[in-house]
């Protein structure tokens, strides 16, 4: 499976976990798992060096778009938990 093929399934898995968070602690764990310094999407960014010159921009855009969506879901989950 190529790096580009991994992005959407990982994003879907992350969204499920973020939306399933019921308290701040579980939300923080999910955030760390997916977006933290050792998170899965950070790991994808680190793998970009192994891609061809043509694939790198596409992968970067796809990863950044997924991270933006996850950050929006994270914000929604925070608001849901705080109320």
Image (spheres, rainbow, N blue to C red):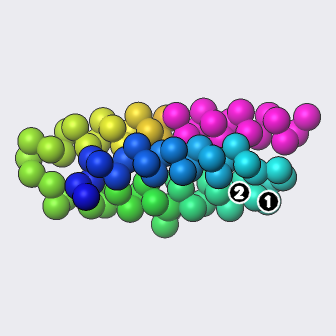
- The magenta segment: 69-83
* Picture disc at residue 25: 1
Q: Residues within 10 Å of mark 2 (few under 14, many from 20)?
A: some
* Residue receiving disc 2: 28
The N terminus is located in which quarter? bottom left
Q: Main secondary structure of the magenta part?
A: helix
Answer whether labels 1 and 2 touch (C-beta < 8 Å). yes
Residue at the image position 22 percent from the left and 37 percent from the top: 58
Q: Is residue 68 left or right of residue 61?
A: right
Q: Residue furthest right?
A: 83
Q: Residues within 10 Å of mark 1 (few under 14, many from 20)?
A: few
Q: Let me know if residue 7 is in the magenta part.
A: no
Q: CA distance from mark 1 to mark 2?
A: 5 Å
The percent coordinates of residue 45 (x first, y second) are 33, 54
Question: Does residue 39 sit above or below 10 in this rendering?
Answer: below
Q: In terms of secondary structure, where does tag 2 sit? A: helix
The C terminus is located in which quarter? top right
Image quadrant assignment for residue 63: top left
Q: Is residue 26 left or right of residue 36?
A: right
Q: Is residue 20 left or right of residue 17?
A: right
* Picture disc at residue 61: none
Q: Residue furthest left?
A: 53
Question: Does residue 35 sit above or below 57 in this rendering?
Answer: below
Residue at the image position 53 percent from the left and 56 percent from the top: 34
Residue at the image position 55 percent from the left and 40 percent from the top: 70
């Amino acid at each position: 499976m190529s790096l580009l093929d991994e992005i959407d399934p990982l994003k879907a898995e992350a969204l499920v976990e973020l939306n399933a968070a019921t308290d701040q602690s579980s939300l923080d764990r999910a955030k760390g798992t997916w977006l933290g310094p050792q998170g899965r999407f950070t790991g994808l960014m680190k793998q970009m060096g192994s891609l061809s010159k043509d694939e790198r921009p596409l992968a970067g855009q796809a990863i950044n778009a997924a991270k933006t969506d996850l950050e929006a879901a994270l914000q929604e989950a925070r608001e849901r938990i705080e109320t």
